[in-house]
Amino acid sequence: MKSSCIIKHFEHYSPLTDDDKVLLDSLEKSPKEYRKNTSVWLQGEPSNHFYTVSQGWAYSYRNMEDGSRQILDVYVPGDVVGLREFAFNKRITGLMVMSDAVLCAFPKSRLTEVFAESLLLCSIFFMISAADQAILLERLVNLGRRSARQKLAHFLLEISKRLEKTNIDVTNHLQLPLTQTILADALGLSAVHVNRVFKELREEKLVGQINGNIKLLNVAGLREVAGFDGTYLEENIEPMLQQARQMQGRIDGAGGANISDLNLVANH
Protein backbone atom coordinates (compact mmCIF):
# COMPACT_ATOMS: atom_id res chain seq x y z
CA MET A 1 0.00 0.00 0.00
CA LYS A 2 1.26 3.47 -0.87
CA SER A 3 2.52 5.26 2.25
CA SER A 4 0.36 8.07 3.59
CA CYS A 5 0.98 10.81 6.14
CA ILE A 6 -1.56 9.52 8.63
CA ILE A 7 -0.25 5.93 8.41
CA LYS A 8 3.29 7.20 9.00
CA HIS A 9 2.04 9.22 11.97
CA PHE A 10 0.35 6.21 13.54
CA GLU A 11 3.33 3.95 12.83
CA HIS A 12 5.35 6.32 15.02
CA TYR A 13 3.38 4.85 17.93
CA SER A 14 3.07 1.21 16.85
CA PRO A 15 3.49 -1.24 13.97
CA LEU A 16 0.15 -1.56 12.16
CA THR A 17 -1.58 -4.56 10.63
CA ASP A 18 -2.70 -4.46 7.01
CA ASP A 19 -6.31 -4.12 8.25
CA ASP A 20 -5.34 -1.13 10.40
CA LYS A 21 -3.62 0.49 7.42
CA VAL A 22 -6.72 -0.02 5.27
CA LEU A 23 -8.85 1.63 7.97
CA LEU A 24 -6.49 4.59 8.23
CA ASP A 25 -6.15 4.88 4.49
CA SER A 26 -9.94 5.13 4.27
CA LEU A 27 -9.71 8.35 6.31
CA GLU A 28 -7.71 10.00 3.55
CA LYS A 29 -10.29 9.40 0.83
CA SER A 30 -12.10 12.29 -0.87
CA PRO A 31 -9.25 14.79 -0.53
CA LYS A 32 -10.05 18.45 -1.00
CA GLU A 33 -7.57 21.06 -2.15
CA TYR A 34 -7.30 24.43 -0.42
CA ARG A 35 -5.42 27.44 -1.74
CA LYS A 36 -3.00 29.30 0.49
CA ASN A 37 -4.65 31.55 3.13
CA THR A 38 -8.15 30.11 2.65
CA SER A 39 -10.47 28.96 5.42
CA VAL A 40 -11.35 25.32 6.07
CA TRP A 41 -13.92 26.20 8.71
CA LEU A 42 -14.93 29.21 10.79
CA GLN A 43 -15.47 29.52 14.49
CA GLY A 44 -19.14 28.80 15.30
CA GLU A 45 -19.81 26.54 12.29
CA PRO A 46 -21.25 23.04 12.85
CA SER A 47 -18.67 20.52 14.01
CA ASN A 48 -19.48 17.42 12.00
CA HIS A 49 -16.12 16.28 10.63
CA PHE A 50 -12.53 15.62 11.55
CA TYR A 51 -9.73 16.19 9.08
CA THR A 52 -6.36 14.74 8.28
CA VAL A 53 -3.75 17.02 6.77
CA SER A 54 -2.51 15.14 3.72
CA GLN A 55 -0.39 17.93 2.24
CA GLY A 56 0.52 21.44 3.29
CA TRP A 57 0.25 23.30 6.59
CA ALA A 58 -2.69 24.74 8.54
CA TYR A 59 -3.37 26.52 11.81
CA SER A 60 -6.25 26.87 14.25
CA TYR A 61 -7.07 30.25 15.74
CA ARG A 62 -9.52 32.33 17.76
CA ASN A 63 -10.59 35.83 16.72
CA MET A 64 -10.42 38.36 19.52
CA GLU A 65 -12.83 41.19 20.32
CA ASP A 66 -10.29 43.86 19.29
CA GLY A 67 -9.84 42.36 15.83
CA SER A 68 -6.62 40.54 16.60
CA ARG A 69 -6.31 36.77 16.70
CA GLN A 70 -4.55 34.10 18.73
CA ILE A 71 -3.13 31.15 16.81
CA LEU A 72 -3.62 28.08 18.96
CA ASP A 73 -1.80 25.42 17.01
CA VAL A 74 0.00 24.70 13.76
CA TYR A 75 -0.71 21.46 11.88
CA VAL A 76 1.68 19.59 9.60
CA PRO A 77 1.11 16.72 7.14
CA GLY A 78 -0.23 13.63 8.92
CA ASP A 79 -1.84 15.52 11.81
CA VAL A 80 -5.43 14.82 12.78
CA VAL A 81 -7.36 18.08 13.19
CA GLY A 82 -10.57 18.54 15.14
CA LEU A 83 -10.29 15.96 17.93
CA ARG A 84 -10.43 18.70 20.54
CA GLU A 85 -13.94 19.58 19.32
CA PHE A 86 -15.31 16.05 19.41
CA ALA A 87 -17.89 16.83 22.13
CA PHE A 88 -19.10 20.12 20.67
CA ASN A 89 -21.85 20.85 18.18
CA LYS A 90 -20.13 23.99 16.93
CA ARG A 91 -16.54 24.86 16.17
CA ILE A 92 -14.77 26.62 19.02
CA THR A 93 -11.89 27.60 16.72
CA GLY A 94 -11.34 28.49 13.08
CA LEU A 95 -8.98 26.61 10.76
CA MET A 96 -6.94 28.26 8.00
CA VAL A 97 -4.33 26.85 5.62
CA MET A 98 -1.05 28.76 5.49
CA SER A 99 0.08 27.09 2.26
CA ASP A 100 -1.59 25.28 -0.61
CA ALA A 101 -2.90 22.19 1.14
CA VAL A 102 -4.87 18.99 0.78
CA LEU A 103 -7.14 17.93 3.65
CA CYS A 104 -9.34 14.87 3.94
CA ALA A 105 -12.61 15.12 5.86
CA PHE A 106 -14.25 12.23 7.66
CA PRO A 107 -17.43 12.34 9.76
CA LYS A 108 -17.54 11.71 13.49
CA SER A 109 -19.58 8.57 12.83
CA ARG A 110 -16.69 7.16 10.77
CA LEU A 111 -14.33 7.62 13.70
CA THR A 112 -16.71 5.59 15.86
CA GLU A 113 -16.54 2.78 13.29
CA VAL A 114 -12.74 2.85 13.40
CA PHE A 115 -12.86 2.58 17.19
CA ALA A 116 -15.21 -0.40 16.96
CA GLU A 117 -13.01 -2.21 14.44
CA SER A 118 -9.54 -1.67 15.95
CA LEU A 119 -8.64 -1.34 19.62
CA LEU A 120 -5.10 -0.45 18.59
CA LEU A 121 -6.19 2.52 16.47
CA CYS A 122 -8.61 3.58 19.21
CA SER A 123 -5.71 3.61 21.69
CA ILE A 124 -3.52 5.62 19.31
CA PHE A 125 -6.27 8.18 18.71
CA PHE A 126 -6.53 8.53 22.50
CA MET A 127 -2.75 9.02 22.64
CA ILE A 128 -2.91 11.72 19.96
CA SER A 129 -5.60 13.54 21.96
CA ALA A 130 -3.46 13.32 25.10
CA ALA A 131 -0.44 14.60 23.16
CA ASP A 132 -2.54 17.53 21.91
CA GLN A 133 -3.36 18.43 25.50
CA ALA A 134 0.31 18.20 26.52
CA ILE A 135 1.22 20.58 23.69
CA LEU A 136 -1.44 23.06 24.81
CA LEU A 137 -0.16 22.92 28.41
CA GLU A 138 3.39 23.62 27.24
CA ARG A 139 2.07 26.43 25.05
CA LEU A 140 0.55 28.05 28.16
CA VAL A 141 3.94 27.96 29.86
CA ASN A 142 5.58 29.34 26.74
CA LEU A 143 3.11 32.23 26.47
CA GLY A 144 3.09 33.10 30.14
CA ARG A 145 6.56 32.55 31.54
CA ARG A 146 9.23 32.68 28.84
CA SER A 147 10.95 35.69 27.30
CA ALA A 148 10.26 36.60 23.67
CA ARG A 149 13.61 35.09 22.69
CA GLN A 150 12.82 31.83 24.51
CA LYS A 151 9.27 31.74 23.13
CA LEU A 152 10.41 31.94 19.53
CA ALA A 153 13.21 29.38 19.85
CA HIS A 154 10.96 26.98 21.78
CA PHE A 155 8.11 27.20 19.28
CA LEU A 156 10.39 26.56 16.30
CA LEU A 157 11.95 23.53 17.99
CA GLU A 158 8.55 22.11 18.91
CA ILE A 159 7.21 22.34 15.35
CA SER A 160 10.40 20.77 14.00
CA LYS A 161 10.17 17.90 16.48
CA ARG A 162 6.52 17.27 15.65
CA LEU A 163 7.26 17.35 11.95
CA GLU A 164 9.73 14.47 12.34
CA LYS A 165 6.83 12.18 13.28
CA THR A 166 4.76 12.79 10.20
CA ASN A 167 6.88 14.13 7.39
CA ILE A 168 7.76 11.37 4.92
CA ASP A 169 10.91 13.28 3.94
CA VAL A 170 12.30 13.91 7.42
CA THR A 171 15.11 16.09 6.08
CA ASN A 172 12.49 18.84 5.70
CA HIS A 173 11.84 19.09 9.43
CA LEU A 174 14.49 21.83 9.72
CA GLN A 175 12.82 24.07 7.13
CA LEU A 176 9.54 25.60 8.29
CA PRO A 177 7.11 27.67 6.14
CA LEU A 178 6.28 30.04 9.00
CA THR A 179 5.91 33.78 8.48
CA GLN A 180 6.70 36.33 11.14
CA THR A 181 3.00 37.26 11.24
CA ILE A 182 2.08 33.64 12.02
CA LEU A 183 4.75 33.52 14.71
CA ALA A 184 3.56 36.79 16.25
CA ASP A 185 -0.05 35.57 16.49
CA ALA A 186 1.05 32.20 17.89
CA LEU A 187 3.35 33.71 20.52
CA GLY A 188 1.25 36.68 21.60
CA LEU A 189 3.88 39.16 20.39
CA SER A 190 3.84 42.04 17.93
CA ALA A 191 5.24 41.47 14.44
CA VAL A 192 7.86 44.14 15.19
CA HIS A 193 8.99 42.29 18.31
CA VAL A 194 9.22 38.98 16.46
CA ASN A 195 11.22 40.66 13.69
CA ARG A 196 13.69 42.02 16.25
CA VAL A 197 14.13 38.67 18.01
CA PHE A 198 14.41 36.79 14.73
CA LYS A 199 17.12 39.21 13.60
CA GLU A 200 19.08 38.46 16.80
CA LEU A 201 18.82 34.70 16.25
CA ARG A 202 19.82 35.12 12.61
CA GLU A 203 22.89 37.20 13.55
CA GLU A 204 23.89 34.40 15.95
CA LYS A 205 23.55 31.96 13.04
CA LEU A 206 20.88 29.97 14.87
CA VAL A 207 18.24 30.46 12.16
CA GLY A 208 18.14 31.64 8.57
CA GLN A 209 15.67 32.32 5.77
CA ILE A 210 15.53 30.35 2.52
CA ASN A 211 12.87 31.02 -0.13
CA GLY A 212 10.61 32.59 2.48
CA ASN A 213 10.98 29.64 4.88
CA ILE A 214 12.67 29.63 8.27
CA LYS A 215 15.62 27.24 8.42
CA LEU A 216 16.97 25.96 11.73
CA LEU A 217 20.74 26.22 11.38
CA ASN A 218 21.85 25.30 14.90
CA VAL A 219 19.38 23.10 16.79
CA ALA A 220 21.70 22.65 19.79
CA GLY A 221 22.07 26.43 20.08
CA LEU A 222 18.32 26.95 19.88
CA ARG A 223 17.80 24.33 22.58
CA GLU A 224 20.14 26.27 24.83
CA VAL A 225 18.30 29.53 24.16
CA ALA A 226 14.88 28.00 24.80
CA GLY A 227 15.82 25.68 27.66
CA PHE A 228 13.95 23.16 25.52
CA ASP A 229 12.87 19.92 27.19
CA GLY A 230 11.02 17.76 24.67
CA THR A 231 9.70 15.31 27.26
CA TYR A 232 6.13 16.42 26.57
CA LEU A 233 6.56 15.26 22.96
CA GLU A 234 7.99 11.83 23.87
CA GLU A 235 5.11 9.50 24.63
CA ASN A 236 5.52 6.02 26.14
CA ILE A 237 2.36 3.99 25.73
CA GLU A 238 3.77 0.62 24.73
CA PRO A 239 2.16 -1.21 27.70
CA MET A 240 -1.28 0.12 26.74
CA LEU A 241 -0.72 -0.70 23.06
CA GLN A 242 0.45 -4.20 23.91
CA GLN A 243 -2.71 -4.75 25.93
CA ALA A 244 -4.78 -3.44 23.00
CA ARG A 245 -3.06 -5.90 20.64
CA GLN A 246 -3.71 -8.80 23.00
CA MET A 247 -7.34 -7.85 23.47
CA GLN A 248 -7.80 -7.46 19.71
CA GLY A 249 -6.35 -10.94 19.26
CA ARG A 250 -8.87 -12.36 21.72
CA ILE A 251 -11.72 -10.56 19.95
CA ASP A 252 -10.62 -11.83 16.54
CA GLY A 253 -10.13 -15.34 17.89
CA ALA A 254 -13.56 -15.35 19.48
CA GLY A 255 -15.21 -14.24 16.25
CA GLY A 256 -15.99 -10.73 17.46
CA ALA A 257 -17.15 -11.56 20.97
CA ASN A 258 -18.33 -8.76 23.23
CA ILE A 259 -15.39 -6.92 24.82
CA SER A 260 -16.93 -7.05 28.31
CA ASP A 261 -17.25 -10.84 28.00
CA LEU A 262 -13.57 -11.08 27.06
CA ASN A 263 -12.62 -8.98 30.05
CA LEU A 264 -14.45 -11.40 32.30
CA VAL A 265 -12.53 -14.27 30.77
CA ALA A 266 -9.22 -12.44 31.06
CA ASN A 267 -9.79 -11.70 34.76
CA HIS A 268 -10.47 -15.32 35.71
Image (cartoon, rainbow, N blue to C red):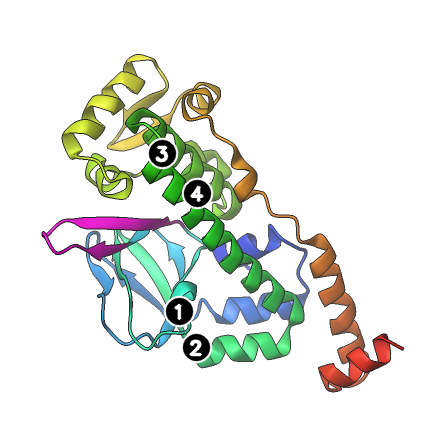
> Crowding near pointer 3: few (<14 within 10 Å), some, many (20+)?
few
Number of the front mark, 3 or 4: 3
Q: Disc 3 designates what residue?
A: 145
Q: CA distance from mark 1 to mark 3?
A: 32 Å
According to the picture, the residue beneath numbered tag 4 turns out to be 138
Range covered by the magenta-colored residues: 61-76
User: Quick check: marks 3 and 2 in contact, CB under 8 Å?
Assistant: no
254 sits to left or right of 183: right
Distance from disc 4 to disc 1, alpha carbons, whole Å, reads: 24 Å
Q: Which residue corresponds to the image point at 66% horizontal and 66% vertical from the top-left?
A: 120
User: On the image, numbered disc 1 is attached to which residue?
Assistant: 50
Crowdedness near tag 2: few (<14), some (14–19) or many (≥20) residues, C-alpha within 10 Å: some
Percent position of residue 103, x then y: 35, 62
**Magenta-drawn stretch, dominant element (helix, strand or loop):** strand
Q: Position of residue 174 (x, y in %)?
A: 42, 32
- Please name the residue that numbered disc 2 is placed on: 108
* Residue 67 is inside the magenta segment: yes
Label 4 vs 2, first from the N-terminus? 2
